[in-house]
Image (cartoon, helix red, strand yellow):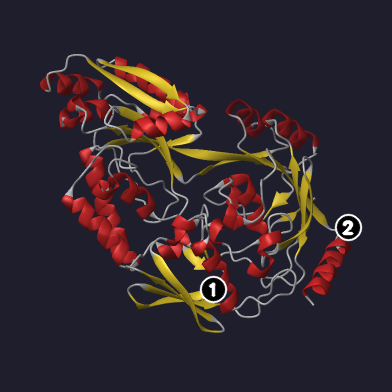
Amino acid sequence: MRTLLAILALWLGGSLAAGQTLVMAIGADPSTLDPQTTAEEVAFFVTHQIYETLVRVTPEGQVVPGLAIAWSYPDAATLRMDLRQGVTFHDGGVLDADAVVASLGRLLDADPPAPGRRLLGPVREIRAVDADTVDIVSETPFAPLLTQLAHPSTAIVPVDLAETLGRAPVGTGPFAFERWVEGSEIVLHAHADYWGGVPELARVVFRLIPDPGAQVFELRSGGVDLVFDVPAGAFDRLAADPAIVAGAVDGWGAVHLVLNLAHPPLGDARVRQAIAHGIDRQQIAYEALGGLARPAASPVPRPVRFAVDLPEAYPFDPVRAVALLAEAGHEHLRLRLDLVRDATLELVAQALRSALAEVGIELDVRVLVPPAFARLAGSADAEALLVRVDVPTFDADDALYALFHSSAIPEPNWARYADAAVDGLLEQGREVPDDAVRMLVYGDVQEMVVRDLPVVTLVQPRYTYAKRPKVQGEVMGSAWFLLDLRAATLVD
């Protein structure tokens, strides 16, 4: 029966050929289209249109229904999901509690562990209560679990087709798989029985164009309708072109200057304050990064739930920086700054070196390959690190617990920051699934770490896009690959 329905779905997709086709550029072929076995952003860009998660997180940080229409907590360690009824997979299979249990169980128990396994945190059991209800039971209360179930890695897949999902994906989403020509394109068509209504777009085509310059050329010439991660120079030109709509969206990452408190000079709060006072975040965001970042003091990026926009506790003040260094006994200070090879981080590093030299702090900048950086970051030899930390779970816990809870020393709490009050608040934030309480808790933590300066948060990068004006109705997520095309259309 499933095979017959799959053939019918493909025929229905073919009958839509005369309808609207949206063409987007991708820079590389995914290695797989099975969302539970990958961490590739380019894969999620495609799979996000095919598969769905139990909940979604809006660009404003609200948790909204996905394949689950409601949720509750029978006890502090159990998250109960009430499933949407009448949903089917693209091949006709029924989405029910057993399907959800099997899908999340596959992610939970994969051997070797799946890339997205950490999203399930301390989950120990997933069980069906009835045909439309699932309980997800953790070893200990874990409030961040709800938002982590919005990540594309937790998408619900038909486990009986698990062996073929990588090349022939089958989900419940608005678009169904049609074909994949490696080195050329991936084509999806509108799912005629989509529970949310048939999309306006008849087809979505992902064209493989590895070179960013070639992507821009194809956009201008009409070969593609939408591109992401536009190079800074090209972005400015596209933004000035009346035939193109270009924009930048706050992303889910932040760039931090991590200060190892175990390194003697950096253990002195006055030295850390001097460093902070010597940095002009505005200059980094608008000059070094061409306006494609937002100056920020809070360690949690704006789109992430429970983020707080905080003022700089130690605003740019070179005179004060010099005075603090002198007070700490350092007229001149030399620090090593390590980072991984990354275009954004390298620009920020150069800006930092120039700015801090003005207040008597000399930075020796080293750009390392990822394995070497990883070895150094968790070692006692680290001094200052420049890192970009993304928060793909949409929840402040993912940034704050990792960077600042003492149990995370030496990595990813590279600063070796330990504060009993901060630990207690972070633990409370995990234990209480009440948004009002968690907002207060994480707000307090952000204020405390901004004051204590184990890290100096510098900027929150933005991702860029450019499109033909006819593309309308799409919703940009907090990451470019979370593009929502359910209401998208092409308007002549």
| Residue matched to label 2 | 18
Q: Residue at x 16, y 29 (%)?
A: 270
Where disc 1 sits, the SS reads helix
Residue at 17%, 14% in the rendered image: 331
Residue 229's disc number: none
Residue 485 visible in the picture? no
Q: Amino acid at mark 1?
A: Val
Secondary structure of the residue carrying tag 2 is: loop
Q: Which residue is mark 1?
A: 101
Left or right of 143, for residue 63: right
* Quadrant assignment, res 37: bottom right
Does 117 sit above or below residue 90? Answer: above
- x, y percentage for residue 455? 29, 36
Of the two numbered discs 1 and 2 on the same chain, state the one appearing first in sequence.
Answer: 2
**Can residue 466 be spotted in the picture?**
yes
Q: Where, quadrant-wise, is the N terminus in this rendering?
A: bottom right
* Kind of residue sitting beneath label 2: Ala
Q: Position of residue 165 (x, y in %)?
A: 69, 59
Position of residue 179 in the picture relative to residue 80 (left or right): right
Q: 35 or 347, which lies in front? A: 35
Side of 293 relative to 1 (left or right): left
**Residue 292 spot, x, y in % from top left:** 51, 34
Residue 156's spot in the image, x, y percent?
Answer: 59, 66
